[in-house]
Image (tube, rainbow, N blue to C red):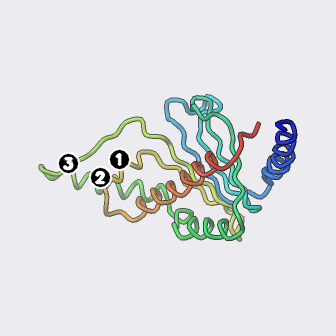
Amino acid sequence: MVPRCLGLVLLVCLPLAASAQCDATAKLAEYRSTPPLLAGQGDVSYRVTVYADGCVSAHFPKQDLRHGTRVLKLAAAELDLTLEEIDASGVAAIDGPALRVRLKDLARQKSAKPDAPLYRISDENILEFEFTADKSGRAPFLAWRSLRDDLLNHPDQPELARIAALQQVFVELGERAVTRSEIMP
């Protein structure tokens, strides 16, 4: 009786594993989180990628206990909702260098006040968001370091809240990929 059940499980599982492959040519958005002390050393970034065919690829780097790539297939409605969340965040339109200059100016003003606290968190990951090219051919990209630090120091800055919200969308997609998929080679 066990061999029949095992055979049935294999027949059911193989098509699922084969259909979990993503069309890597149709990337819509990608999130990467890289420890700054490991940057440039190969496979060190946590990466979540959303593809046009509804696939979500979550790659965990070699230093992570969950090392490997997991693939999750979203239903059309889930993909539409995810893309709406990504677009609604407005992160693709944030001018990172201009925001950094504005935050430095605000920190300078804040440090002039004797009782104003300034927070420092060291070794925060470098966050990168990459989006598909727009009509002009420009592919929006945002790299940010010290998000938690900046949120503590500037909680009234809406761009920081939008970056944090989009980061959470991608992290949740990655966690769903872990719980609902198989490890891919």
Amino acid beneath label 1 = Asp
Label 1 environment density (alpha carbons within 10 Å; few <14, some 14–19, many ≥20): some
Secondary structure of residue under mark 3: loop
- Helix, strand or loop at label 1? It is helix
Q: Nearer the viewer, residue 112 or 65?
A: 65
Look at mark 2 in the image and give the residue it sits on: 153
Type of amino acid under label 3:
Pro
**In this figure, which residue is indicated by the disc labeled 1?**
149
x, y percent for residue 8: 85, 45
Q: Residue at x 65, y 46 (%)?
A: 58
Percent of width and height locating residue 108 = 26, 51
Q: Give the alpha-carbon distance from disc 2 to disc 1, as whole Å.
A: 6 Å
Residues tagged 2 and 1 counted as in contact (Cβ below 8 A): yes
Which mark identifies residue 117?
Answer: 3
- The location of residue 104, given as percent across then percent down, is 34, 52
Residue 78 vertical placement versus 183 (above, below): below
| 177 or 42: nearer the viewer | 177
